[in-house]
Image: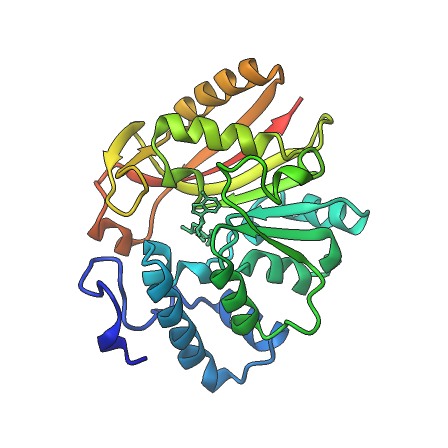
Amino acid sequence: MESKDLPDQNVAWFDERPDDSQLSIDARNLLRNYSGIPTEEIEDHVVKLRNEAWEIFPYPCIGQFRFLDLSLKHTKEYQEILDRLAKGQRLLDMACCFGQEIRQLVADGAPSKNLYGCDLRKEYVELGYRLFRDHDRLQSRFLTADIFDDPSPLTELRGTFDVVYTGSFFHLFDYEDQIRVSKAVAQLLRPVKGSFIAGRQIGALNAAAHDHRTNPTGKMYRHNPESLKDMWKKIGDDLGVTFVVEATLHELSHDHFRFHTGDTRRIHFTIRRE
Ligand SMILES: C[S@@+](CC[C@H](N)C(=O)[O-])C[C@H]1O[C@@H](n2cnc3c(N)ncnc32)[C@H](O)[C@@H]1O
């Protein structure tokens, strides 16, 4: 399909082509070295698959090529995660979309059979196989499930993950639904000291709910570190578990301010079971 036929392109979060921050050196290296895509074909390949994904659901992360973001490898926990996976522990990428973080972990030596991905939309998982050209070799298991559903293919795996990664996921919801989603994700963790959730999402200097038309309830609650700790204290009290939260705010790249307020930041966090 030509880009002129795509739905809702005339929005601030749809870019025709990726810039160097969106199709980063990390993403190019992964697509060249892991997927074997020739350098000169990478950009057209990415745009073609992005356009197909946009038709499925026009999330800002699709319009802005954020499905190429490779955040996990830049966290201080990355080596710990690789070590855990090498020992046979298991990681779930919750709301994995195309599953780019799973491919980066495999490229960095993680056994792919210890990695799981879950997304609401099976089509994104299929597009991920095509983006990374690894259907015939990736042994990771991808589930299709809605985090709110119980039972679902995900609920069968409760209590089995040592690490759950959640990139740009909790921020899809307002405060009350973030509590519901966070509890469901917390219950996926192996019930032992040290299992943890890692992630990043849109946050803010001043924690508050904002209108956000692409979110299911039209609201996005943007946390700062204090509000995130406070929310996880409540969740822990309800679940009878102590969670230790570390969170930091980071500047966003300039393009985000086309549709966010000036106090918006990115929040990175880990939430560990005591
Ligand atoms: C903004 S994207 C983030 C993708 C990826 N984690 C990343 O960081 O690039 C949000 C993802 O959440 C998935 N999602 C939305 N609601 C969901 C739900 N209720 N249960 C499971 N996945 C959901 C969407 O299909 C989409 O792939």
Which quarter of the figure has residue 29? bottom right
| Relative to 26, residue 80 above or below | above
| Relative to 257, residue 188 above or below | above
Q: Nearer the viewer, residue 103 or 246?
A: 103
What is the quadrant of the C terminus in the image? top right
Seen as rendered, the residue at the extreme left is: 10
Q: As drawn, is 200 to the left or to the right of 186?
A: left
Residue 57 lies, in percent from the top left, at 35, 58
Q: As drawn, is 265 to the left or to the right of 69?
A: left
Q: Nearer the viewer, residue 175 or 69?
A: 175
Query: In the rendered view, how is the structure colored?
Result: rainbow
Q: Nearer the viewer, residue 130 or 253?
A: 130
Can residue 126 be seen here? yes
Can residue 29 be seen here? no
Seen as rendered, the residue at the extreme front is: 151
Name the residue at 22% across, 40% down.
Answer: 262
Name the residue at 54% across, 26% down.
Answer: 245
Seen as rendered, the residue at the extreme right is: 87
Residue 179 lies, in percent from the top left, at 45, 26
Which quarter of the figure has residue 170? top left
Name the residue at 66% across, 65% down.
Answer: 107
Residue 145 lies, in percent from the top left, at 54, 47
What is the quadrant of the N terminus in the image? bottom left
Total label count? 0
Name the residue at 72% across, 45% down.
Answer: 90
Residue 210 lies, in percent from the top left, at 24, 34
